[in-house]
Amino acid sequence: MLTASSFHPSAKRRRTGAAVLAVVVMMPVLLGGPVTAGAAPTGPSAGSDDLQATDNLDPALLAEMRRQEKLQPALTAIWDARMRDPHSGFAGVAFENDGLTVYWKGALTPGMSAALDAGRAFGRVVVKAAANSEAELHAAGGRIHSVIDRHGGSDIQSISYAPDGTGLHITRGPQATRGGVPDVKARHGGAGRLSVERILAEARVAVPVRVTDATEPFDLLTNRLDDSPPWNGGGRWESWRGGDHRMSCTTGFGVHTGGRSYVLSAGHCATPPDDAYQGKFGGAFDEMGPVYDDDWRSDLLLINASGWHLIFDGSATTSTTKAVRGWGYWAANELVCQSGMTSGTVCGIRQQSSTDFRVSCNTPDSDGDCDYVIYGVIKSTQVNGSTAARTGDSGGPVFTLDGTGVRAKGIVSGGGGTTLYFQDWADIIRVYGAYPNTSSSTS
């Protein structure tokens, strides 16, 4: 049993202007926080009969994922070239017409030309002209964030960057929330919400902007139940500080960086000096280790515990696992799955755009911090209208197929309804220089 004497209280570390969401009813939310019994969908518990496992995917979804799988080497070559030159004319890349389309402004660089030539060995790769580069769009988004920070509040929920370079898509918080619930920051003496129109006028954004109202909640998704070291991805873990239970979340991937192995999860779930435990809340626990580091800007953290090369694949109570065989970058229109400890495996989630979202003070992170921006998460939608993720899924693995195993794509941050937000592997590399443990690297 976990007791208060098992912990060593430590001073709380605050982040200035930073926080992550717990579940809210009418706003996008980071999927972290308390989880009630019975929240998980039901289903077979293990083995090939587990209907949620990727072995039982809908044939049409499976066929599309296999077609996209064949182009992963091309996608990697393209993104590697982009990461070597982040201020180039690159706007984005998307799966289109059974191939890959790279959106680009201006003349191709020699590095990208070589990447495209290499990628065409694996399938159809074309280039289309973009009105704006990724760097230009993000610069415009940065000006908007600066105005919001200067005034201390807004009704903007997220800023998405079109992968075809056409412009920005700003989402305001749901109308019911903006009209009927006072802003938490205003109640505490802040300036309250600033309208989108005023923000855009002050930021003097030169790229096209589309503004819509959110129709689904957004939550930070915190909350399988009995794992042991080295730790698999997709299992339940809890953060504690002293005798204080902070959040319940999902383990992501076992990763390695700097010659050591860690467990990757979502940054809003914990902060050093929190400790990570595996097991069911209120029951028996296994200590995983201390939280090594968290990066709130990208919503990532590392637990100082040995991660394995397997993830759970199936229902919320499954013991079925799949081997991690590699990793890859994101692309618009690509289908991914997520494996959260509450939802189990959910597939048919189509990637849309890179997005920055602001954490609401209605749903703060494990430290109670709020009103900060999580940058560069990938907005995605479940294609059949099903729930993409639930409370407790935060930090869980996002993946595609790779032969009989899976390819790591990122870590769940939040969502609501049919929408999932996850942090992609390019940012995991940028922040931690970390790569997933695979069946070849750990054998």
Image: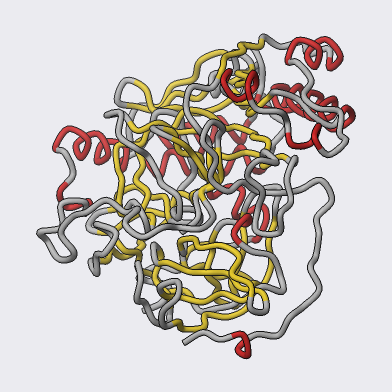
Q: Quadrant of residue 43?
A: bottom left
Q: Quadrant of residue 374?
A: top right
Image: 436 above or below 231? above
Q: Nearer the viewer, residue 236 or 430?
A: 236
Give the colour scheme of this rendering.
secondary structure
**What residue is drawn where x is 63% and y is 60%?**
433
Image: 440 above or below 188? below
Q: Is residue 214 left or right of residue 310?
A: right
Q: Nearer the viewer, residue 62 or 216?
A: 216
| Residue 362 horizontal/vertical position (percent) | 65, 40
| Residue 263 horizontal/vertical position (percent) | 52, 69
Q: Quadrant of residue 205?
A: top right
Q: Nearer the viewer, residue 215 or 37?
A: 37
**What residue is drawn where x is 66% and y is 11%?**
209
Looking at the image, the residue that sits furthest to the bottom is 5
**What residue is drawn where x is 61% and y is 73%?**
240
Q: How many marks?
A: 0
| Residue 56 horizontal/vertical position (percent) | 15, 49
**What residue is drawn where x is 71% and y is 54%?**
368
| Residue 190 horizontal/vertical position (percent) | 86, 34
Q: Say which quadrant the C terminus sits in.
A: bottom left
Q: Is residue 390 left or right of residue 405?
A: right
Image: 179 above or below 426? above
- Residue 309 seen in the current view: yes
